[in-house]
Amino acid sequence: MSFLLESRSLEELETIEEYAYFNRPLLFSCRNSAGQIFFALWIKETEDFELYLCVPMSQQRFEEVDTGAIDIRDAFLKSESGFVYEVKILRENSPDDISTIPSEKINARWLPPAGESLKIEQETLPVLVE
């Protein structure tokens, strides 16, 4: 999924992985052209826009979330940067509406329950035998 975001660190994003999908990606990871990783969560849809939360994270933090060491809720509430992006993707041909909000100001009802995590198994390649 690629969408255009107007902000200093957000721009056209390339999807890394989709974790939940129902008519659209609901929970996914992505990165911008500079390599900054974001974890994104679909919140809601109205007639005028779709709302997502995007949290920037380091490669190490991404791996911790991806393997379940950090749960999804804490990835947002305890972001490394102390903030998340609230992104409204507008239906009309208008620039997306992006605001930065402190992690502690996130509407907790938007987030999964504590303890819900990803447990992505890493694929182990077979040993080559000559």
Image: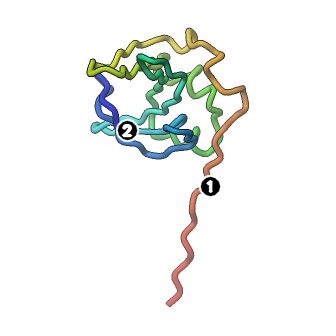
Q: Is residue 94 left or right of residue 48?
A: left
Which picture quadrant has residue 76? Answer: top right
Residue that sits furthest to the front in the current view = 47
Most foreground residue, 65 or 92:
92
Asked if residue 24 shows in the view, the reply is yes
Asked if residue 61 shows in the view, the reply is no
Identify the residue under disc 2.
31
Quarter of the image containing the N terminus?
Answer: top left
**107 w.r.t. 24: above or below:** above
Disc sitting over residue 121 in the figure: 1
Callout 1: few (<14), some (14-19), or many (20+) C-alpha neighbours within 10 Å?
few
Most foreground residue, 86 or 55:
86
Residue at disc 2, secondary structure:
strand
* Distance between mark 1 and mark 2 Cα atoms: 21 Å
Q: Amino acid at mark 2?
A: Arg
Q: Residue at x 56, y 13 (%)?
A: 106
Most foreground residue, 43 or 101:
43
Q: Amino acid at mark 1?
A: Glu
Q: Is there a contact, CB below 8 Å, between mark 1 and mark 2?
A: no
Q: From the top left corner, tell me how far across and down residue 37 is, in percent.
A: 41, 36
Q: Residue at x 56, y 43 (%)?
A: 19
